[in-house]
Image (cartoon, rainbow, N blue to C red):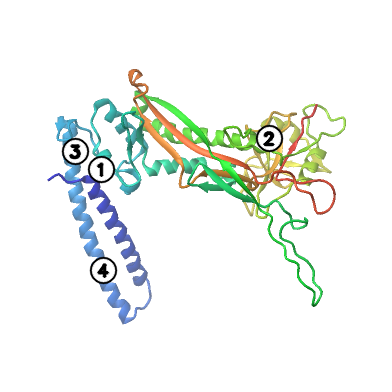
Amino acid sequence: MRVDIKQLRQARANKAKDGKTVLEQLNALQGKPTLTEAETAQVGELESKVDALEAEVAELDKQIAVEEKKLRRASLFGSTALGGPALATVVNDTDPARTAGFKSLAEFAVSVRNLQVNGVADPRFAAAASGYQQNQGSSGEGILVPTEWREQIWSLVFDDNDLLGFCNPEPTQGNTVGIVKDETTPWGAAGVQAAWRSEGSQMIATKAALTPTIMQLHELYAFVLATQEILDDAPRLQNRILTQAARAIRWKAFEGVVNGDGNGKPLGFMNSPALITVAAEAGQATGTIVTANVLKMMARLFEMPGGSPQWLANRDTIPQLGTMTIGNNAAWLPINQALSGGAIRKGGILLGEQLSFNEHCQTVGTAGDLVLADLSGYALATKQGGGIDFAASIHLYFDQNLTAFRWIFRVGGQPYLSKPIPPAKGNNSKSHFVALATRP
């Protein structure tokens, strides 16, 4: 009877997990200076459990080694019961349920190509773990990548240190998400209100003024071709199909957050009715930024409780920012290390708020070259649970000896505010997003 190596490795992983739990309990008891009689008895029981689990893991390791030896021999000596030229499948995986037994995404990608070129399935495809499936069929769409690497790409896209990570996530299981917006303010006439009451007088009830809104998720994709040379070079392949794809998806997604027109893509804050545009100063020269510009921009920001306002700027603005002063002090502090109390992005600090240079902002002198934004005021709708579909196939470019890798990422978004809000005092409205107008 043929032994399923994948089941063996799953059993081994389960036993190792159980052993870790028992060992932690044992170490905790043995670390006590004194033990009660009951705890002493418990130590003996845990010792016995650890010994038993250790023996079971050792036995499973032996069985796995035997099966791996068979697979290595099959790889060396040709045709096997697998049906054709055999493939080496030495597995160094600690969580088969997430990786289907592959030790790296590069190894998985090579196995996909070998499957479709030689017509021989890697045993790890035949007994795939939960959450992993083949997606070939008559149309030959490809093979769905295991959970581990789909989530790695997701994590790279939503890196906490990247701008996309500052937006407010609105996860959904479907292709639309319903959000409820509350655009009222504590000082406004609508929404939940507080009031002073004289003794014996009746309280006047108020209620939240909520506006339901539906956001559509849009399809964003990355499509990469890999030559046989790249497939043979695992480190380069890993970099190309993980790091570079995630970087491209992240850049395009945040481009939608900033500049999207809402047509088949998110509604960017630069095209939203919620944007406030601060006019240039009278007689201000083309392509300049002056201190009065940034001070007036700060005066128009509406910061959400717990928000994280920051400046976004094109690097073309550096010559202007570098000469700005308030009195005898520089307005921009171009530091490149963390200050006490929090991390500061490499762009430094402008008037007390962090500054991030990026390629989403317009060139200097154009509206959007400098923006003050609280990105927590932007609702970013994504598929729940690591929503990047990732598949690989050779069918499309078979005659060119190329393998295609495809990512599909569904995302939608819009600012929470539908328009700037009136202030409690004064006449200048406020918003989460404030931009400097074009300087003619």
Say few, some or many: other residues with alpha carbon within 10 Å of mark 2 (under 14 / 14 to 19 / 20 or more). some
Task: Determine the residue positioned at 21% across, 51% down.
Answer: 61
Q: Which residue, given by chain and number where applicable, does mark 3 sit on?
A: 71
Q: Position of residue 73 (x, y in %)?
A: 16, 36
Callout 1 touching callout 3 (CB < 8 Å): no
Badge 4 element: helix
The residue lying toward the viewer, choosing from 403 and 45, is 403
Q: CA distance from mark 1 to mark 3?
A: 15 Å
Taking the image as shown, residue 12 lies to the left or right of residue 275, namely: left
Badge 3 element: helix
Q: Residue furthest left?
A: 1
Q: CA distance from mark 2 to mark 3?
A: 58 Å
Q: Which residue, given by chain and number where applicable, does mark 2 sit on?
A: 271
Q: CA distance from mark 1 to mark 4?
A: 35 Å
Callout 1 touching callout 4 (CB < 8 Å): no
Q: CA distance from mark 1 to mark 2?
A: 49 Å
Q: Which residue, given by chain and number where applicable, does mark 4 sit on?
A: 47
Badge 2 element: helix
Disc 1 vs disc 2: which is toward the camera?
A: 2
Disc 1 vs disc 4: which is toward the camera?
A: 1
Q: Amino acid at mark 4?
A: Glu
Say few, some or many: other residues with alpha carbon within 10 Å of mark 4 (under 14 / 14 to 19 / 20 or more). some
The residue lying toward the viewer, choosing from 301 and 425, is 425
Tell me the quarter of the image containing the C terminus: top right
Sequence-first tag of 4 and 2? 4
Sequence-first tag of 3 and 4? 4
Say few, some or many: other residues with alpha carbon within 10 Å of mark 3 (under 14 / 14 to 19 / 20 or more). many
Q: Amino acid at mark 3?
A: Leu
Sequence-first tag of 1 and 2? 1
